[in-house]
Image: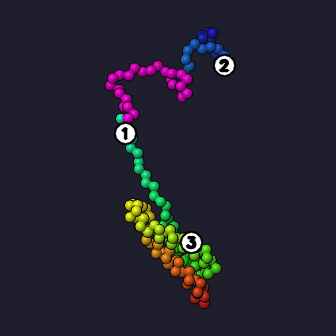
């Protein structure tokens, strides 16, 4: 193999040295290990304290969503009697869910819905009370 002549293309020749200058990702080639001194002591993994953020998993109630559902269901139940079975179902479902979770602030301190649960409960109660109003009067109250 003539190293002094310029080569224009690569060929299948044996190269007597390592072509890589460092570690390869797949660790097929290894670079020379550096001599470690006594001053550079790596910490043992047991000594490393890892700060893990604590995430609390709260049961999803969605009090803000129940406020919206209560307003829509109440208005539809009061003024459109033909949709009152559907809106009444959602109102009673919300009443059931919010009644079971009224004391969520006591059971799970710091729950995100603890402030809105009382407001959502009263909105749902009003939407349930709009059902008989819609059955009795509906739009006919305006005419």
Task: Tell me whether circle 2 and circle 1 mark residues in contact (CB < 8 Å).
Answer: no
Residue sitting at x 38%, y 64%: 106
Of marks 2 and 1, the one in the foreground: 1
Disc 2 target residue: 9
Circle 1 Cα neighbour tier, 10 Å, few/some/many (<14 / 14–19 / ≥20): few
Residue 52 colored magenta? no
Furthest residue toward left: 39
Circle 3 Cα neighbour tier, 10 Å, few/some/many (<14 / 14–19 / ≥20): many
Q: Which mark is residue 49?
A: 1
Q: Is residue 85 visible?
A: yes
> Marks 2 and 1, Cα distance to the nearest angstrom?
54 Å
Label 2 secondary element: loop
> Marks 1 and 3, Cα distance to the nearest angstrom?
50 Å
In percent of width and height, residue 14 lies at 62, 14
> Marks 2 and 3, Cα distance to the nearest angstrom?
77 Å
Q: Is residue 84 above or below residue 3?
A: below
Disc 3 target residue: 90
């Amino acid at each position: 193999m003539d190293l002094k002549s310029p080569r224009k293309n690569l060929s299948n020749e044996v190269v007597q040295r390592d072509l890589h200058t460092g570690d390869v990702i797949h660790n097929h080639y290894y670079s020379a290990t550096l001599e470690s001194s006594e001053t550079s002591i790596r910490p043992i993994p047991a000594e490393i304290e890892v700060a893990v953020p604590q995430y609390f998993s709260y049961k999803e109630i969605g009090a803000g969503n129940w406020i919206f559902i209560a307003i829509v269901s109440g208005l539809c139940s009061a003024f459109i009697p033909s949709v009152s079975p559907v809106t009444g179902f959602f109102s009673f479902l919300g009443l059931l869910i919010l009644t079971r979770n009224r004391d969520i602030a006591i059971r799970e301190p710091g729950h995100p819905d603890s402030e809105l649960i009382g407001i959502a409960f009263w909105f749902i109660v009003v939407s349930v009370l709009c059902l008989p109003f819609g059955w009795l009067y509906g739009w006919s109250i305006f005419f």
